[in-house]
Image: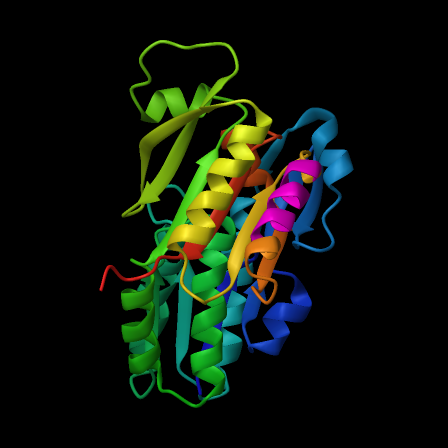
Amino acid sequence: MSVIFASSTCDLDNKTLKKVGIDIINIPLIVNDKKCLYSADKFSFDEYYATNECVVDEDKYKKILNTKFLEALNSGQDVLFLTPNAKYDNSYKYVKDIIKQLAPNYPEQKVEMVNCGNYSLGYGLIVYEAGILNIRGENITEVIKFVNKIKHGIKTYIIPSDLTYVQKKLTLVGSTIGVKPVIEVSNAELKLVDKVRGKKKMIDYFAGLINNNSHELPVSIMCGKNADEALALEEIVLADSKDRQIFKATLNPLFLNKFGNKTLSISFYKKSKK
């Protein structure tokens, strides 16, 4: 068994992470000029929502990563870090530098990283399934092979409440009051796939995607201040399949900063066309 690290931006609660043996690294943030660690089930979202000012404390994060890696390597174990999205998250860059520095000092151990190419609980689903494989005793090579396969099947869809960031990344032609874009995370990139108008149609659209396209693995529902929409979506999904396992989370502040405080997002493992 190896040590698998993941960023707390996977948005899974500590109980779930411990159950599958993931060693989470809580991201150090500066929120409204106050320093804190981001943990999905301990973060003060009310304070964050007050002004929405939030950045990563980069120097502290690098120190935490270095310390965690050294602890694991000095215990004689292989190390794997699963990063969210190499293009939009600095974890990949920081971990890459640390591996470059530390790996030559531990030639008998594997020190690896995989870019999951996803966001929030889309990333979290990959982390969760990798943890299950790891606690079953699979070696690091098999876990990496599994992650590189499953990550292409994990689909994340976003309906943002703030279009500022999206407009910089995508070409949105025109704008109509009440109409929101549906964004898919595809191969670590953002892709406009549809548009919806109104809260009910937004919820029904996501329910249709989940009920018609998802594999039996857990489904994720994520939101910001719009918890009522997430609850309504959950009820529709469970009405279709009462035994479906659903992970729910408040989107992490780094995500909300990009897409807005009333963003609704889902992730699931897409069924094979076969």
Q: Observer-nearest residue: 63 or 8? A: 8
Q: Main secondary structure of the magenta part?
A: helix
Residue at point 45% right, 71% down? 129
Query: Count of labels shown?
Result: 0
| Residue 251 at least partly seen | no
Percent of width and height locating residue 91: 43, 52
Residue 56 versus residue 52 in the image, above or below? below
Q: Observer-nearest residue: 246 or 114? A: 246
Percent of width and height locating residue 210: 46, 51
Left or right: 250 with respect to 99?
right
Q: Which residue is situated farthest in the front direction here?
A: 240
Percent of width and height locating residue 154: 37, 56
Left or right: 193 with respect to 53?
left
Left or right: 34 with respect to 62?
right
Q: Observer-nearest residue: 63 or 7? A: 7
Residue at point 27% right, 74% down? 145
| Residue 56 at least partly seen | yes
Region rendered in magenta = 228-237
Residue 212 versus residue 158 in the image, above or below? below
Residue 106 versus residue 270 in the image, above or below? below
Q: Observer-nearest residue: 71 or 82? A: 82
Q: Which residue is situated farthest in the left direction here?
A: 274
Q: Quadrant of residue 137?
A: bottom left
Percent of width and height locating residue 221: 56, 49
Residue at point 30% right, 81% down? 142
Q: Quadrant of the N terminus?
A: bottom left
Q: Quadrant of residue 190?
A: top left
Residue 199 versus residue 111 in the image, above or below? above
Q: Is residue 110 magenta?
A: no
Left or right: 253 with respect to 69?
right
Q: Is residue 229 magenta?
A: yes
